[in-house]
Amino acid sequence: MKTNIVTVIRISVIFMTMTLVSCSNGKKSAEGPQEVLSENAIELNEAQFSTSGIKMGLIGDHSVNATLKVNGLVNVTPQNIASVSAPLGGFVKSTNLVQGSAVSKGQALAMIENFTYIEIQQNYLETKARFQYAETEFKRHSELHKENVYSEKNVQQTEVDYKTLKAELKGLEQKLTALGIDPLQLTEDRITGQLPLYAPISGYIRMVNINLGKYVNPSDVLFEIVNPHEVILELPVFEKDIRKVRSGQQVSFTTPNDPGKIYHANIYQAGHTLNNDKLSMVYAKIEQPDDHLLSGMYVNAEIKIDQRSSLSVPQDAVVHFYEKSYIFIFKGIRMENGKKIHDFMAIEVITGDTGDGYTGIKLPDGTDISKSQIVIQGAYTLLSAWKNAGEMAC
């Protein structure tokens, strides 16, 4: 606490000293002739400059990645989310899964009991037996018809029976397959009233809506499985910005849980429609996702929308005051009363794109500072001294 107080006192002394010296920009001592300084000029003596923390560098052209800041969501594609239901409903006989459990494709999730399962298997086996008999009769009648033993009418009747049973058999095969039963492996000794529910994909259980003895309907979602290794970003972009976004652009993002770790993604689909909130959804594929990125997690993202080379300065070189932006150039060192004076000049600029630590600027017409040094650190210290001097109107 003591250190903070001392720091505040030191900063206050520096600003007060700068203010007093800066006031001399507009009014000089009566000791001899003095030059008249511009209202945008700031001067610091050697002691003030040493304690100001000011650093200088050259202005130049830089490639600036313009960025668009958005808030988004980690999600998964539809093919990596699976809802599991019991096709014909039934009673839950067993399960050992909870939310967050890892499952593999084809793994049994729960056992469901339903007497309808028995009826379907029984109907299938009975229909299969009748079909085999009808198939044999149809072939026999067809051969005898060729020898003029049976009439065409008899052949047609056996053909109808054969095709009808074939259709019924195919339908029952599809029902068995939907229940997870292999029709080729089903025999009279393997009929069962309990059938397992299998995981259609590998992943983690996100939702469980099941318990022992519960009766479930075919429309009830019993489990929801998510594959977290195929996560994507969903980024809502405002209508006014969507024209800046396109496929192939890079995205960097962080999560609230670990703001120090930066993830990267690439946009693979830019939105082409707007919702009721005038937002368009942009999708990006995440590079090297890890287990810390969970479906439903919020993110803070920056889309690199453009890269251009322009006259730019480090971001810390630009200061803002009353909706105007300024940079400071170093005019040189002169001697006054035997002491060194560091001269600076404030120049109003129009700022452009900001990114990668640089801000694009536009100088006033006719201004050439290509060979001048600018303040790249400590610019707000100069701004405070400059504005305080003007307000005090010494």
Image (spheres, grey):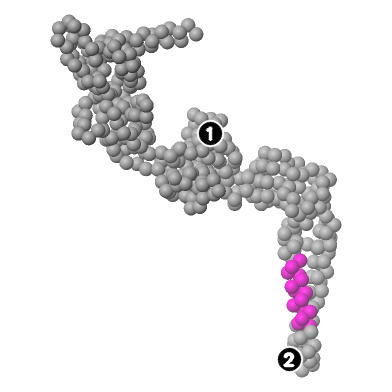
Pointer 2 with pointer 1, Cβ within 8 A: no
Task: Bin the neighbour count of mark 2 within 10 Å (Cα to Cα): few under 14, some 14-19, many 20 and up.
Answer: few
Name the residue: 79% across, 50% down: 216
80 on left or right of 368: right
Numbered range of the magenta stretch = 158-172
Quadrant in which the C terminus appears: top left
Residue of label 2:
146
* Nearer to me, 67 or 334: 334
Q: Quadrant of residue 130?
A: bottom right
**In this orientation, which residue lies closer to the viewer: 51 or 21?**
21
> In this rendering, does residue 164 appear at all?
yes
Q: How many C-alpha atoms fall within 10 Å of the one at disc 1: few (<14), some, or many (≥20)?
A: many
Furthest residue to the front?
393
Residue 291, quarter of picture: top right
The residue at 54%/31% (across/down) is 256
> Disc 1 marks which residue?
255
- CA gap, disc 2 to disc 1? 79 Å
* Residue at 79% from the left image edge and 92% from the top image edge: 151
